[in-house]
Image (tube, rainbow, N blue to C red):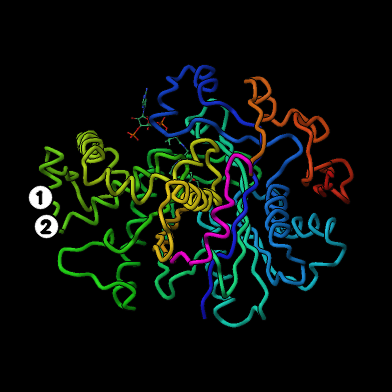
Amino acid sequence: MAAGIDDIAIYIPRLFMDAGDFAEARGLDPQKLVKGLGVSKMAIVDSNQDPACLAANACLKIMQKNKLSPEEIGRLYVATESSFDESKAMNSYVIGMLEQVYGAGSFQHCGGIECKFACVSGSYALYDNTNWIRAGESEDKYALVVVSDIAKYDLGSSGEMTQGGGAVAMLLNDSPRLLEFDPKVTSTSIKNEYDFYRPFGKETPIVHGQYSNLLYLIQVKNALNDYKRKALKTGLIDMKEGQSMLDHIDYFNMHLPYSNMGKKALAYLVRHELRNTPKWKEVIAEVGMEEPVPKDPRGTIESIISDSEFMTKDSEFTKRFAKTNTYQEIYENKVASSLIASKSIGNLYTASLYLGFRSCLEYEFQKGVSLEGKRFGFASYGSGSSAMVFSGVIKPEHLQIVKEMNLETEIGERQKLSLSDYEELHENKLEPNQSLLHAKKEFVLEHVENISSEKRGERRYAFIE
Ligand code: HMG
């Protein structure tokens, strides 16, 4: 049975930190953010927003847009790594909020859980719900999967320039208008790692930045190798002599902790894909240097990172490679449009990959490119760590949805934060009733109980008309 994404909606907080102001405050060259990382604005949550209300706002948008009633939703999953309760799942809060609009008990028939595996959990949630539909369990109901996160790092840390926040809601069914997932090719890779993690009770993660960058690339490559094996075995693709996956995937959507990670990941994967093809000789001539090899090619990630001679040469090779016509053509045609939204929003953890997908649809449509029948490859990565690679094909009906997409209108009027307001919000110095913006037609957090021991941690939300 077919299954895929029928529609997609985003909710992005309207406050933002400007990269230039941020760089000045931290004594950094603004070009490091803008050019080096591809970050021009970071979406920041107000004092009356938490990941559950971001998720509920995205769900409400997609339900209202499609005129759906709760009876038409069979499952509501939330994937997040910004969880605030060790037991009570975030989708229960979301259902509580939606029932303020649709009526008490209106979602009672619905099932679902909160999923966790850093940024990759949204992809596992999509896959599980796709299989619920494929198994014929859905009784013509939709699955609603919402990915919602607040990417927050310590003040003054190197991760602080890669923050963001927001939610993406995706409606899944058996006759999707946007994208149908390819069956039997979803592939994963997993390993116990400490590249980025957030121990209980700590609001911000412990991060080993450069290690996480390299691990992301390696894990995605491993999952891609397995995807390739499955795609050949199932006959999804027929690879002719001298071809690579690049000949069979029209667009690549990558997890985007910052926009330029998409470029970095593409360069790594393209090198991997072309290395054993006849084209590689031509590429090496264009690059003007041999591809460097680590002293210990079978070594650990730590040993590769500490091989400074290799790391310097490899960085030089990547920079030159990224300037070749071969790479540029692939980048412009297969990835560039997916990176646009991330630049002005930042890292959304679980939601980043899907904001990228949404960005690709909108900006390719604006370029006048016909997407019908095009295959999208998705490279999802979650620290800790696991990668998932899967694909799907764009449906003819996508135009009904894509022609209405407009990132700026969907976010609404944004407000730039001063450094002091940003730092106050970051350090949780403002109460929900001291929010900087006036909410309109959205859910907000009103109160978190912290006095009564019987009710400690209970959250009260309101829908503001
Ligand atoms: P850093 O180490 O300070 O930055 O922090 P850098 O020195 O690597 O510089 C970044 C880029 O800017 C480099 O380009 C520099 O050359 C360039 P590249 O070599 O990569 O092409 N640059 C400049 N460009 C122009 N003008 C200048 C200039 N200066 C430097 N003046 C890091 C970067 C990403 C490590 C840090 O921000 C960090 O730790 N972020 C958080 C962790 C992260 O995002 N990791 C990404 C992979 S792991 C992942 O994606 C999972 C995650 O989303 C969590 C989850 O799964 O839940 C994070």
The residue singled out by tag 2 in the image is: 278
Q: Is residue 103 left or right of residue 296?
A: right
Q: Quadrant of ligand 1?
A: top left
User: Which label belongs to residue 281?
Assistant: 1
Determine if the magenta segment contains residue 394.
Answer: yes
Q: Which of these two is toward me, 217 or 107?
A: 107
- Res. 389 image quadrant: bottom left
Residue 45 is situated, as x and y percent measured from the top left of the image, at 67, 37
| CB at disc 2 and ligand 1 closer than 8 Å | no
User: Which label belongs to residue 369?
Assistant: none
- Res. 309 image quadrant: top left
Q: Residue at x 70, y 53 (%)?
A: 61
Q: What's the distance in space between the residues labelled 1 and 2, CA to CA? A: 6 Å
Q: Which of these two is toward me, 58 or 22?
A: 58
Residue 252 is situated, as x and y percent measured from the top left of the image, at 38, 54
Q: Residue at x 40, y 60 (%)?
A: 377
Vertical arrangement, residue 71 with respect to residue 242, above or below: below
Toward the front, the furthest residue is 368
Residue 334 is situated, as x and y percent measured from the top left of the image, at 35, 51
Q: Residue at x 56, y 69 (%)?
A: 176
Q: Is residue 194 visible?
A: no
Q: Residue at x 72, y 71 (%)?
A: 72
Classify mark 2: helix, strand or loop. Answer: loop
Residue 145 is situated, as x and y percent measured from the top left of the image, at 62, 62
- Res. 98 image quadrant: bottom right
Q: Which residues are magenta?
A: 393-409
Check whether the beta carbons of the residues at disc 1 and disc 2 lie within 8 A of each other.
Answer: yes
Determine if the magenta segment contains residue 85.
Answer: no
The disc labelled 2 sits on which kind of residue?
Pro
The disc labelled 1 sits on which kind of residue?
Lys
